[in-house]
Amino acid sequence: DKLSNIGKLITDKTGTLTHGSFTVKDISPIDIDVDYFLNYLVALESYSSHPVGRAICHDYKNRKFPVVNNFNETIGYGCEGDIEGHHIIAGSIKMLNKYNIEYKPSNCSGSIVYLAIDNKYKGYVCLADTVKDDAQPMVDLLHSRGVRIVLLTGDSEDNAKDICKKLGIDFWYSGLLPEQKMT
């Protein structure tokens, strides 16, 4: 009964509207060999608890990677650690900004993980997540009852816009940290 009186629904994306099982869609190293790029990225992400980190590692389970020392993960930003005498940073634009690393933003639609080695931007990996089969019918049902839908996501503006356009979601806030979704 109470649900029939709501005028607005606020939702997260990953695991709610999408499956949360990412696949690598694009690997774009800059001024670095792709194997070297992946060696550091996958080694670092293998320590991560984030679904994106696990997806990056998925296809490389049987490959041997160098040891990561001083690993640190910051929720909503990314992770960092030391590998073979290099400081490796993998994460969002927020993570690069935290260290004042100059970068070229990706225009890839998806979840993007940027990589820096010794505070030098070295490229990105773009991952895709698939929309759940019941997401569109649910959005349509809510709209038919006059409910506006707002998406809250840590993803990029472009990715938020794409998913909202695809599903017909009314509005979104992107680039949010987990605690920002609660306020």
Image: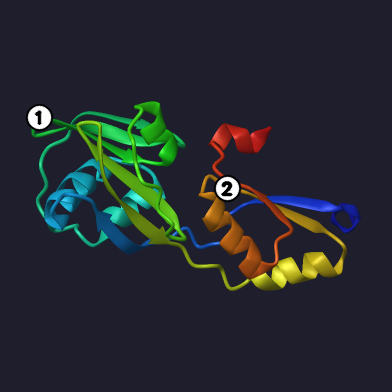
Disc 2: CA contacts within 10 A as few (<14), some (14-19) or many (>=20): many
Position of 81 compared to 18: left or right?
left
What amino acid is at disc 2? Thr
Residue at the disc numbered 2: 153
Above or below for 9 versus 76: below
Q: Could you say which is closer to the camera, residue 76 or residue 50?
A: 76
Position of residue 110 measured from the top left corner of the image (x, y, whole percent) = 45, 59
Local secondary structure at mark 2: loop
**In which quadrant of the rendered image does the C terminus lie?**
top right
Q: In this view, does 81 lie above or below 27?
A: above
Report the label total: 2
| Residue beneath disc 1 | 85
Q: Specify which label sits upstream in the sequence, 1 or 2.
A: 1
Instruction: Report whether residue 1 is seen.
Output: yes
Vertical relation: 15 (above or below) 95: below
| Left or right side of 117 for 143 | right
Q: In percent of the image, x 32 and y 35: which residue is there?
A: 79
Secondary structure category for the residue under label 1: loop
Residue at left 66%, top 71%?
Answer: 136
| Image location of residue 182, percent across then percent down | 65, 35
